[in-house]
Image: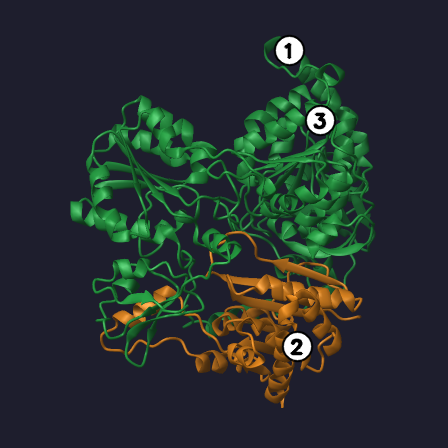
Amino acid sequence: MEKTYNILFAGVGGQGLMLLSAVLGKAAVDAGLDVMTGETHGLAQRSGSIYVHFRIGKPISPLIPYGSADMLIAMEATEALRYIEYLKDDGVVIMSKNIMHPVAETKAVALDKTRKTKYYTLSAVEEQLRKVTSRVIALDSLGLAIQAGNARTENSVLIGAAAACPDFPISSEDLKNAVLSLVPPKTRDANAKAFELGTEAGTACLQ
Amino acid sequence: MTVEDVKRTENSKALMLANEAMVRAALEADVKVVAFYPGSPVSEIMDTFSEVVDHFGDFKMEISANEKVALETVAGASMAGVRSLTAMKSVGMNVASDAMFSIAYTGLKAGCVVIMADDPYAHSSQSEQDSRYFGEAAYVPLIEPANSQEAYEMVKWAFEVSEKYRTLVLLRTTTRVNHARSMTQLGDMNRTPFERKKWKDVKDQYFTVGAVARELKIKLLKKREAMKEQFENSQFNKIDEGEGETGIITSGVCYLHTKEAMRNLGVSLPVLKIGTINPLPESKISRFMKDLDTVIIVEELSPYLETRITALAKDVNPSLRIVGKRDGSFSEALEYNVPIVEKVIATTLGVDTSVDYNRYLERAAELKRDLPERVPVFCPGCPHRGTLWAFRQALTRLRIRDDIVFNNDIGCYSMAFLPPNEFSDSMLAMGASLGISAGMSLVLEDKVIAMVGDSTLYHAALPGIVNLIHHNSNVTLFVLDNSVTAMTGQQYNPNTPFDAGGRSARKIDMDKLFEALGADSVTVIDPYQTRDCIDPIKEAIGRDGFNVIISRRECALYGDRLKKSRGERIPRSENDKETCRNIYACVKEFYCPAITIDESDYKIMIMETLCDGCLECRQVCPVDAPRHIVGR
């Protein structure tokens, strides 16, 4: 692979972002590609903003330069916008429609007696993202996971959607195999289904 | 999966964090004793060793009470004749350094390696400390890798150097190296059985003071001289040939940023990458810059290399232009990335950067203008949330909110400085809340209150506590006993009956400890019975003398793990909307991320996917609206 393909993963602590990155890492390595990541570990608190810089091909630095990510995969919608400086013009955004509201925002919404203060919405996120790219895949990842038979297969939905992108450097087959080899054996069927639902939904969004 | 890569016996390539690669290297080097106190960004080193300690069964491991004890433990093992290793974060070395300076004098026996990680950007530390100075100051060799492969190779080399010169070796990393994953070529794993030794077979003297110290210092200087040649020619100091009169000297992860920046710019400048920070390869540096017109020095934090290179340039190339921190091109603050390095190289060469990075940053700032910030908060189910709520209520009822000083300490509970608590008058270093309280209680009229967690208590707070009790100080101490060292990943500590790998250990009896020390009172509260905590806290704060409030409830993440291992379900809670009267006590005073507002009726809604079922929110609700979901 001559070019480097850059993916920025974003999410909220506790969502399993590291596992998502590990699955993709295995898929890339099994496909014979070189991989490098820059990860957020450390403070164990949940509910903080976290990211993984994930680079396939010929990366040298573990960090993606601004404006150079081919893809942004967000497990929470506002987190996609939080790292938007990394996305190249017309890069792909794959994001869950799920929004986890920060507590300070909840307080502002609750205490405004005029009820004018509203939560930051999914459509506001999408509107901002579309100023940078037309390729936004917003998925009801939880709904699709439940449809697949297991609410905990949201990661597979998102990876399945990545496989729908024509320029993605890892084949759908390799991606799926990596997912299935790393999930608990009894959830394999649900994960396979989640992956397929993700691919279908992703394909639909890109058309 | 990666633990499998650490365990496997054959050599192969693996995608590894540098932290994991260093564990693998130490095991390949037949390390026999490891000891740690956890700290980001090196916690995964200890965690990985913990995961494989039973699998190998041929090395000893301890989770130490603090970094100084960990360093002394591995030094003792080295004196006893086996290879040993510890890892600590930058500020951990501050604690350990007292022993380290003396160990440098006496030297050691078997290979002994200390991994020490700095944290540019202070991702998870109190400061952006530059620990490279420790090597030079203590006369201890210090090396620095750029990625997992080099970290792996350097650990193995460090053991050899340590044995050859009978010295401790410091391996300095930065967060970006510890937490970067890249392909690593592993070697063969040939472990030997653990065998106890006899002191008479390995003995030597490790003693330094006065006349002995003066003699050892002379030997130490000779040792440094002897090391220089090998370090000069080390494979870790390498020159990438290039074109032009401008060259770059760099080290660590900055080397990677530099190489990528040059690729982006389509230029190929000569680069000297330094791996041995102490002793520095002075001859190699001098040769490299002798014929250059300009040298760009790329290093994060202090101008450590720059200062030394400037001194060398005075002799070999006095007219050399040095681009670095002293001329303002680079900052001593924060961490670097490709754009930062690329901009300086581009400016020096008089060309444009490959991408207009500022455009992306400015556009992003505009797009994110209304995006709510995501500030760290306590986890759902965290016992600290209840403790701090009850503490605030007690202060309000005593009407002393403005007549206290609150000295916070290092742990998850450091977040008491954030809303909704916003009280932390100080927060400095492990256990520092006690000493600071000693000074303040000598001077202030106010009630002095300190707070530590269980791990911090045993790490560095005990001397401060002894000091306060001995001096009859009027200080109230909160001990947040959540069973484990929560913030770094819920590791075991002297407050648990477990050691590394879940092996059994002796739990220190905290209540008896305070009694024996002579605390004036010890009050134990359960933060899940949040309302019931207010009165005991009021009483304890109201008393004179040294009074201890132990708030006891395991870390929610650790508690979840225990429940899962026992096959128990984690209960979830819901808001009974019939009962809820939109008082929002659970929102304004509590800040649980599982609680949101239902914008259809403005009642609160508990997110089932996030809730831990602690029901602390019911305790703060004046009408008891939150309740467990029946049947879950």
Please report whichever mark, 3 or 1, sits nearer to the chain's N-terminal start.
Answer: 3
The chain letter for the residue carrying disc 2 is A
Whole-number angstrom distance, CA of label 3 to CA of label 1: 17 Å
* Label 1 element class: helix
Please provide percent x and percent y for residue B429: 44, 38
The hue used for chain A is orange
The amino acid on which the numbered mark 1 sits, given as a three-letter code, is Val
Residue for badge 3 = B167
Residue A98 versus residue B157 in the image, above or below: below
Q: Position of residue B165 (x, y in %)?
A: 76, 25
Q: Is residue B410 visible?
A: yes
Give B316 or B277, whichever is nearer the viewer: B277
Q: Which chain is green?
A: B
Q: Which residue is label 2 attached to?
A: A192
**Quarter of the image that includes the N terminus of chain A:** bottom right
Q: Chain of mark 3?
A: B
Q: Which mark is residue B212?
A: 1
Residue at the spot 52% in from the left edge and 48% down from the top edge:
B488
Q: Residue at x 63, y 45 (%)?
A: B45
User: As shown in the figure, which amino acid type bears the numbered disc 2?
Assistant: Ala
> Which secondary structure, mark 3?
loop
> Based on the displayed image, in which of its 4 quarters is residue A167 positioned?
bottom right
